[in-house]
Amino acid sequence: MSRRMLLWTTVFIATLGIVTIVPSRMMAQKPTLSAEQCAEVEEAKRLIQQASQLYKQGRYAQAIPIVERALAMQENVLGSEHPDFALSLIALGELHLKMGNQTQAEALFRRSQATRLYTLGSQYSDAVVCQNRSDGARGRRG
């Protein structure tokens, strides 16, 4: 698979929200967060929304440090294997892609993909295979 196709496949999957499926093993092991940790998670969500608005305005360079801050908060509270962390990696990767930093974007997309594969297991693996086949079929027809 070419780098470009991998990048677009990852962005497409994130856009559809496929990575929001939480496996039952994570639900069973869900830690109880303190009020302070909950506030930090909510702040990270607010930062991601703020960065999304900047993205829509084409202000990519301003959005990057905001997403990086949200990522640090999520990693601190939720851990680097959490689906929300993986989604934020995709957001940061998309910003870098828009800024022309393809190498950085690809590294972030790969890290997100590895996180989702670890977190979601074979459910995610099957979804990616089907998506790749679907993209490939469209490419051959069109």
Image (cartoon, rainbow, N blue to C red):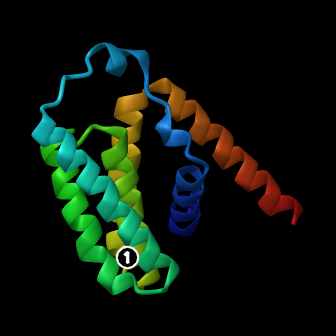
Query: What residue is rendered at 27% in x and 49% in y?
Result: 42
Residue 45 sits above or below residue 59 on the image: above
Q: Secondary structure at mark 1?
A: helix
Q: Amino acid at mark 1?
A: His
- Residue, disc 1: 96
| Front-most of residues 66 and 122 | 66
Q: Residues within 10 Å of mark 1 (few under 14, many from 20)?
A: many
Question: Quarter holding the N terminus?
Answer: bottom right
Asked if one can make out residue 108 in the rendered structure from this viewpoint, the answer is: no
- The reply to whether residue 81 is visible in this rendering is yes
Q: Quadrant of the C terminus?
A: bottom right
Give the tally of numbered discs. Answer: 1
Front residue of this view, candidates 35 and 114: 35
Q: Is residue 83 above or below residue 45?
A: above
Q: Left or right? Give the position of 37 relative to 90.
A: left
Q: State which quadrant residue 63 falls in.
A: bottom left
In the image, 11 versus 141, the foreground residue is 11
Residue located at (31% from left, 83% from top): 62
Say whether residue 69 is left or right of residue 104: left
Image coords of residue 71 (percent x, y): 23, 57
| Place of residue 140 in the rendered image (x, y in percent of width and height, measured from the top left) | 83, 60
In the picture shown, does residue 57 fall above or below 10? below
Q: Residue at x 88, y 60 (%)?
A: 141
Could you tell whether 20 is left or right of 68 in the image? Answer: right
Residue 112 position (above or below residue 78): below
**Image location of residue 132, percent across then percent down:** 65, 48
**Residue 9 figure quarter:** bottom right
Q: Name the residue at 40% across, 74% down.
A: 95
Q: Residue furthest right?
A: 141
